[in-house]
Image (spheres, rainbow, N blue to C red):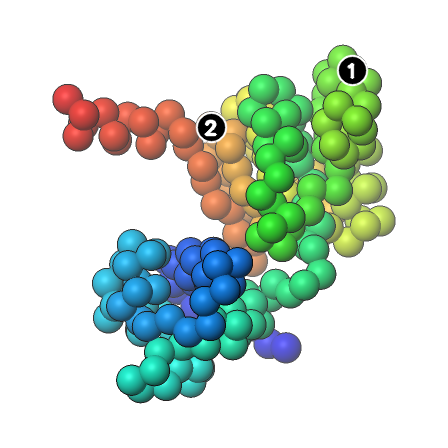
């Protein structure tokens, strides 16, 4: 199925709506109004309806949206399904190890199937300790190619960020979630989402002062 051209911010908000819908399903809710779903996602109803225009005609005027129907439609647009999408993580320091232990990825449809690190001490970490096998980073490219991995999380120091990204891109990864402070340069057909925790705190400090 050919992907629809959707603005990046809209894609992000669709992922928020999907999370809210998953929560509603767990609570046994069958239908939801645009106002309630928008409130749960922290957006305006007009913004939500505009975003859902990319999904198609999934709501009924006066009745709202079927939670299961809308969730399935968003999954189809986003390329997610009941099959867990494989992800690799590079960098098993404090942050990387915390991400490996986070159980919420599977709930959202993703599975970290392997981790990689340059430190022999981290590589010796067992599956029981980290939850996934930890390999030396020298085998990253071959592993990604063999397993057809398209998504990766980078949690390495800034000095190593670009070199790791280069290996991932060369191996066929098309989407990177970057916790490294490095600003990554990748081809136009690849996507990088930057997570800069320090920058987020700096911006919050303005409002806290």
Q: Nearer the viewer, residue 177 or 96?
A: 96
The crowding category of the residue bearing disc 2, from other C-alpha atoms within 10 Å (few below 14, some 14 to 19, many at least 20), is many
Residue at (18% x, 25% y) in the render: 208
Q: Nearer the viewer, mark 1 or mark 2?
A: 1
Is the C terminus in the top left, top right, bottom left or bottom right quadrant? top left
Q: Nearer the viewer, residue 96 or 186?
A: 96
Q: Is residue 38 above or below residue 98?
A: below
Instruction: Determine if residue 65 is in view.
Output: yes
Q: Of the two numbered discs 1 and 2 on the same chain, state the one appearing first in sequence.
A: 1
Q: Dividing the picture into quarters, in which one does residue 102 lie?
A: top right
Where is residue 41 shown, x and y percent of the image? 34, 56
Where is residue 86 shown, x and y percent of the image? 71, 50
Instruction: Determine if residue 187 is in view.
Output: no
Is the N terminus in the top left, top right, bottom left or bottom right quadrant? bottom right
Q: Secondary structure at mark 2?
A: loop
Where is residue 184 shown, x and y percent of the image? 51, 38
Residue at (48% x, 59% y) in the render: 27
Residue at (50% x, 64% y) in the render: 28
Extreme front residue here?
Answer: 28
Q: Are marks 1 and 2 in contact (CB under 8 Å)?
A: no
Is residue 91 shown left or right of residue 74? right
Q: Secondary structure at mark 1?
A: helix
The crowding category of the residue bearing disc 1, from other C-alpha atoms within 10 Å (few below 14, some 14 to 19, many at least 20), is few
Residue at (79% x, 26% y) in the render: 128
Is residue 63 shown left or right of residue 123? left
Identify the residue under disc 1.
120
Identify the residue under disc 2.
181
């Amino acid at each position: 199925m050919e992907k629809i051209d959707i603005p990046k911010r809209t894609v992000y908000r669709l992922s928020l709506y999907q999370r809210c819908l998953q929560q509603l399903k767990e609570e046994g809710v069958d239908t939801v109004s645009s106002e309630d779903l928008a409130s749960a996602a922290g957006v305006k109803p007009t913004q939500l309806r505009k975003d859902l225009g990319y999904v198609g005609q999934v709501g009924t005027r006066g009745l709202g949206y079927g939670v299961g129907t809308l969730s399935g439609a968003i999954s189809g647009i986003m390329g997610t399904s009941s099959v867990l999408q494989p992800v690799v993580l590079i960098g098993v320091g404090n942050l990387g190890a915390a991400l490996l232990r986070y159980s919420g990825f599977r709930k959202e449809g993703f599975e970290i199937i392997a981790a990689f690190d340059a430190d022999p001490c981290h590589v010796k970490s067992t599956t029981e300790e980290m939850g996934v096998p930890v390999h030396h980073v020298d085998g990253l490219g071959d592993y990604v190619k063999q397993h057809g991995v398209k998504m990766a999380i980078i949690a390495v120091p800034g000095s190593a960020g670009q070199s790791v990204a280069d290996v991932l891109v060369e191996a066929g990864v098309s989407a990177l979630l970057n916790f490294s402070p490095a600003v990554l340069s990748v081809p136009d057909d690849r996507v990088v989402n930057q997570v800069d925790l320090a920058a987020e705190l700096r911006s919050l400090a303005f409002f806290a002062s």
